[in-house]
Image: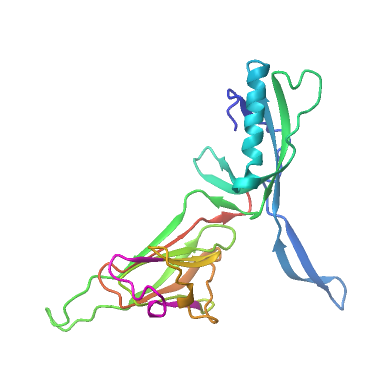
Amino acid sequence: MTDVSADWYALADGVSGMGAAPYTLTSDPHPRGGARLRHAQPQPRTIVWPVLVKGADHSRFTTNWRRLARAFTRTLRDGPGTLEITRPSGSTRRIAVYYSDGWDGRGQHATGITWDSAVVTLWCEDPYWADAVPVVVHRETGAQVDFLVPYPSLSSGQVLGASAVTNPGDVEVWPTWVITGPASVITFTREDTNESFTLDMADTVHGPLLAGETVTVSTDPPRVRSDTGENLIGGLNWPTAVLWALPPGETPVVFQLDGAAAGSAVDLTFHPRYETA
């Protein structure tokens, strides 16, 4: 969208909505004057994106204008599009957008023949920008050893152990977990808040995970699926289960798999989210 040799490209003049997310503040009056902030609620983001469209002749211009209009407006029927901002360093942040308003020509002299521009308004459900490159944290059961060889030894068959996960973004993220069997009971705990959730595979239609089988736990929206598509959300320890988020910075966590053996693993994946592009 910034290649000025193309038939359409973004105009730098007039772009807005790339900064910090908008918030609605809820406050309570304070007896001594002023108020105290009770809650800050992030609001949907609106991005204004001016676009110039051109063509070698009127027919080509009209074709380009209609194609691009259709590409923007189809987000209202087929789901959101993705606006990506890539910096010279190569880092890319993206945001899901819906067309809202503005695909209309300038209506000025000489426009609408071989060129015209539109000031498009894009609406974003989630106001935060996400890194295009996910963070993946992999933890795997250590090698198992014989108890009597070469001397009495213990190897963990249950706990992958305490760990620390770093969220480099500006705001909390809701990760996705992929657990690879064997495993019978899966427990993930966020130690700083003691929030946790447990998935007892024996309480599901699938039964305990065998070697190589996987189950995916999505925290937003809440979803638990086996690798064959079975709905396993009933195996969570409701109502005490908390599918917790990761705040910015380092968070101490514990990955625990009962019935683990060689090959048992946990993969936690998330896209860091940021206030600005």
Q: Position of residue 124 (x, y in %)?
A: 66, 51
Q: Eyeballing the image, is 252 above or below 1?
A: below
Residue 199 in the magenta stretch? The answer is yes
Q: Eyeballing the image, is 168 above or below 181?
A: above
Tell which residue pokes out farthest to the left in this image: 150
Quadrant location, the N terminus: top right
Residue 92 in the magenta stretch? The answer is no
Q: Is residue 54 visible?
A: no
Q: Which residue is nearer to you in this view: 181 or 207?
A: 207
Q: Which residues are magenta?
A: 196-215
Q: Position of residue 128 (x, y in %)?
A: 62, 54
Q: Quadrant of residue 173?
A: bottom right
Tell which residue pokes out farthest to the top in this image: 57
Q: Residue at x 68, y 52 (%)?
A: 20
Q: Is residue 158 visible?
A: yes
Is 183 left, or right, of 218 in this rendering? left
How has the structure been colored for display? rainbow
Q: Position of residue 230 (x, y in %)?
A: 42, 67
Is 249 left, or right, of 179 in this rendering? right
Q: Residue at x 72, y 55 (%)?
A: 22
Is 143 left, or right, of 231 in this rendering? left
Q: How many marks?
A: 0
Q: Which residue is nearer to you in this view: 111 or 250?
A: 111
Q: Eyeballing the image, is 249 above or below 196?
A: above
Q: Position of residue 65 (x, y in %)?
A: 66, 28
Q: Residue at x 75, y 38 (%)?
A: 102
